[in-house]
Image: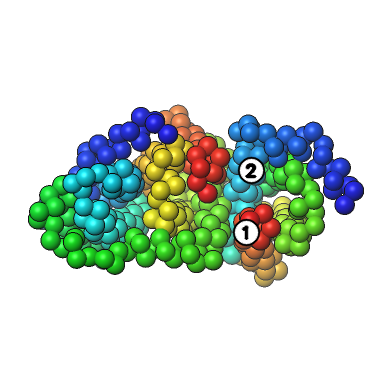
Amino acid sequence: MGLLNWLEMLPLSVWVHESPSIWAQPTVMTFHTMGMGVLVGACWILDLRLLGVSRSIPLSAFRWVFRAVGIALVVNVITGVLLFMARATLWGTAFPFLIKILLVVASASTVVPLRKYVMSHGDTGDVDSRARMWAMLSIAAWAAAITSGRLLAYTVAG
Amino acid sequence: MPSIVSVNVEHLHLISNHIPTIGTVVVLVLMTIAFFRKDEGLKLVGLEILFAVAVLTLPVFISGAAAFQKLRTMPGISSNAIRLHQDVAIYGFVWLQIAGFIGWVALWRARRFGRAPKGLTIASFLLTIMSLIVMGRAANLGGDIHHPEIAGAATTATDFLQAKISNIMVNSPWAWPSSETVHFLGLSLSFGVLLTINLRILGAMKKVPFSAVHRLLPWGMLGFGLNFITGMLFFIGQPGQYIDSAPFYWKIVFLVVAGANFLYLTVFRKAWAGNDSPNWQAPGIDKAMAYVSMFSWLVVLYCGRMLPFIGHSF
């Protein structure tokens, strides 16, 4: 509790939480949503390709996805930390929030084996079943992460 | 909020309410001529206009709902007559959106395979007739609003569709949260597809022919469709919290821009005519379109997320 209290009392946290400025919480939240759209959208496009959509596009053409994922991940970690700090005592003690973070971490970890696969299998036609399994896992995990995140507004902060 | 838009919203509806009826008539005429002349190009023009009419009917519907909130308490105006008009307009809107969607699928297939499939073309033609009939009735009932002496049906009507949808959206503990969740999932899917296509136009994935990324468009349509349906549920459920909101109007404006761009991405020819090949490079004008597309979707998202903060919606 002490640490969470200290986090919440930092001037930056207080500003994000209490400033009436449009640049405080509203903008941080909006960037968090934009980052989500790019991050999950880019992952899903790659997953769809691995599952057989647009098979004519060589896998190597999808390497831009990892750069987009990287940028969006940085944006969302920064905005996410800011949003957490703003109400640290609330989020830090809420079980639904813990679930959301675990789902986000699980979803983001699927990028590692997917990246490894795409980087080593340039342009070959068939995708092996392990990679397809990771792709399906990635689709489901991101969907669960978004769902749990959106519902935080009702389960915790409602 | 006394912005220019909300002050004139009744006017906006009076001007734009002709789009769904006149627009569908134009579509039907063009497609009929195309059928008799066996003119494939004209048929596609008809389908393109159908898509545009479906997109433009969104602001018509929004402005009508806004006008209702402004006019309902005026003397000499029958609130029931407006509600009846609105209900029929909802049905007409749904028919027209389905027609526009089927027309879009036909256009997408026409771009891929050279000609629009017969079944889909006939289906969109019939759906357009259906939309015209229902929209015609809605227009008719709209006229009754100012003529309560002939608005017979309205005085007895009590059970309104809009009220039912609103009741579910407001009172069900899960309707609003689950619609929001679907809205966020759909947003991510559309973003992924549009990012891929626009990045290709801007020069990423140079080795990939445009037709290969064009293949992804229906997935973008799926994401957008989910958001369109859930978005309409929010709006019909709680119109009062949107019609005075400045970011909401900007969101609609940029949705129309994004819709025009989506049509362009579906049908534009340059990437296909004879050079549907790897290493295709987009001309400057198409690169500009790609930037407009990405910018529009970002503005749509920004305005949507800002609704609770710049306006007062949730």
Of all residues shown, which one is farthest toward the front?
A: B75
Write down the chain letter for disc 1.
Answer: A
What quarter of the picture does the N terminus of chain B occupy?
Answer: top left
Picture coordinates of residue B194 (x, y %)?
50, 46
The secondary element bearing badge 2 is classed as helix
> Which residue is at 41% across, 40% downward?
B244
- In this rendering, does residue A13 appear at all? yes
Q: Is residue B15 above or below residue A46?
A: above
Q: Which residue is mark 1?
A: A154
The secondary element bearing badge 1 is classed as helix
> CA gap, disc 1 to disc 2?
16 Å
Q: Is B311 placed left or right of A7 in the picture?
A: left
Q: Residue type at mark 2?
A: Met
Q: Which mark is residue A29?
A: 2
> Which residue is at 50% across, 67% downward?
B172
Picture coordinates of residue A64 (x, y %)?
64, 44
> Which residue is at 87% across, 52% downward?
A1
Q: Are marks 1 and 2 in contact (CB under 8 Å)?
A: no
Q: Nearer the viewer, mark 1 or mark 2?
A: 1
- Quadrant in the rendering for residue B85: bottom left
> Which residue is at 76% across, 52% downward?
A90
- Quadrant in the rendering for residue A107: bottom right
